[in-house]
Image (cartoon, grey):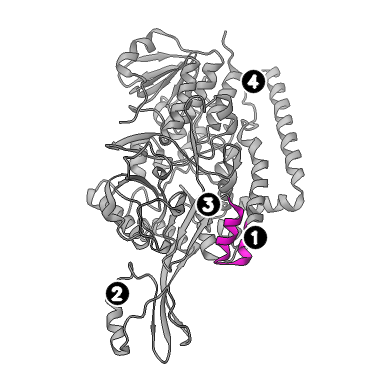
Amino acid sequence: MWRRSFSTATNASTALKEKKWDVLVIGAGHNGLTAAAYLAGSGLSVAVLERRHVIGGAAVTEELIPGFKFSRCSYLQSLLRPSLIKELELGRHGLKLLKRNPSSFTPCLDGSYLLLGPDRELNHSEISKFSVNDANAYHRYEKQLENFCKLMDPLLDSPPPETTQNGASFNDRMKDKFRKSVFWASFMRQALSLGQKDLVDFMDLLLSPASKVLNKWFESDVLKATLATDAVIGSTASVHTPGSGYVLLHHVMGETDGDRGIWSYVEGGMGSVSSAIANAARESGAHIVTNAEVSQFMVKDSGTVNGVLLVDGTEVISPIVLSNATPYKTFMELVPNNTLPDDFTRALKYSDYSSATTKINLAVDKLPQFQCCKLNHPDAGPQHVGTIHIGSESGGWKEHPAQWTTTDNCKTLLDDPANKLHHLLLLDLILLPYWRIDNPLHTFAMSFFKSMEEIDSACQDAVIGVPSRRPVIEMTIPSVLDKTISPPGKHVINLFIQYTPYKPSDGSWGDTAYRESFAQKCFSLIEEYAPGFSSSIIGYDMLTPPDLEREFGLTGGNIFHGAMGLDSLFLMRPVKGWSSYRTPLQGLYLCGSGTHPGGGVMGAPGRNAARVVLQDAVKP
């Protein structure tokens, strides 16, 4: 089992009880560890309490099958804030990023494929196979998104300009007004620098469905379907959901070593991100304890937090507590009853924590061989390096003129026309994805279409309560670049799958047969593109929405600690009036992805929360 050497509950209870800590952090996910590193670095005594046996939260590496190290939840890095990497010196603490080039591969059942990456010439050449117009537009599309991200960057690295709550002193209110004036003045300068046309385009992106945005830019279904997955990743939204266009910014929002829009693997898996941050925190004096589950916050009659009570009965005293748990878990499960304002509780209770995401981590004995690449050797190729987009494709009959003749991408069934229809029914469409039947009168073909409509169809299945009949799958194979996570010649594969309802109407995720049936459906879908895939599987780990909730504390299985719709961002996250990481209980703060700027392995919520705590409380 992969893990760092941290204190456990058995040998740490005495140390926790005997000391009054300046700060307690609940949850050793990457945001909690980030907050701890900054606070400890400012001279405060900090203890981090983690429920599980291993740190990292959803940014974790675990060896569940001997020799294979899985990034069980998050699996790619790009959003981790550059300021955090620099300030905490994460490179010195063991963080090593492995850039992916190309970054995206979309195989199609008709034998075509699309490769995309940071190479502008490659992108133009690849997209031109489907549309010259799209190839010419793609660079402009990326540049516009990059310009919008430059407007967003200052927002990510700053606490929201929240209104001061009642009870603040006159001096605090004046300081708060000054800080907000500076914030908004800076933002307006940035916004005005875009110009009115780009500002209108930016608003259009924020408010529109992803399908509308992509239809304006492109005509090729393959390109649009590939890009559309960015807009629905980790959510229950369809490509036609208003506001889903905003998430397209994630395509270029992050960076790796200064290169904008480059997503990378992390050597050793995503747990190495958490490990590097933890090393920085420990170097500054933070005390990290695993197997230390919190059962309740201790709150004085005055409404002030005074520490936490662990499940083993240990009381840990501190005047400041930061919760890296979801807002729902923090306030609905850990805060004592009748200590929060009714309107605050009501807003939290009706926040959206829905999820339709399942993660399957596999150990395999060989790389998948994609038919469209017409290769049959065990070595990794460019198609294995980036994110592989599986699904979003359906077949249908089309009638074509008789002069449409057989090509390399099709196969004549029989010379005798009388026997063709009989043998048609026996054809294995998985192994023969594109074919035609010729006769003197007409030509029929089975064609396959990769489109945004198929993503929407997969979503609509979940809306009526059943897992997608043809799931949308993002496959990554980090062991192609990272040789530390699997035995030689074998590989680790991540499958990020949509859409899977939390409570299916046709079964239960607690039913072993039901789980196995869905897993096999996913494997069979991949088999259509890469025959032999199923036989390569050594073993796998499957996390449905209830599993993500139980194992990692993700309410509803939502990987972002709450939906990322426009009504749940910035000043509205986690609820209106409480976006500044402070809470109605004095001394209690939030520092997880349920706060601004939201989900993903970003570290910004932890960093921003630590800054707010340091503003509010300076060590005596």
Mark 3 touching mark 2, by CB under 8 A? no
Residue depth check, mark 4 versus mark 1: number of the one nearer the observer: 1
Q: Residues within 10 Å of mark 1 (few under 14, many from 20)?
A: some
Q: Which numbered disc flags the more N-terminal residue, 2 or 4?
A: 4
Q: Residue tagged by mark 2?
A: 427
Identity of the amino acid at label 2? Leu
- Going 29% across and 48% down the picture, which residue do you hit? 365
Q: Gap in Å between the C-alphas at discs 1 and 3?
A: 19 Å
Q: Gap in Å between the C-alphas at discs 2 and 4?
A: 75 Å
Q: Secondary structure at mark 1?
A: helix
Q: Which mark is residue 495?
A: none
Q: Which numbered disc flags the more N-terminal residue, 3 or 2?
A: 3
Q: Residue tagged by mark 4?
A: 168
Identity of the amino acid at label 3? Ala
Q: Which numbered disc flags the more N-terminal residue, 2 or 1?
A: 1
- Quadrant for residue 267, please give it: top left
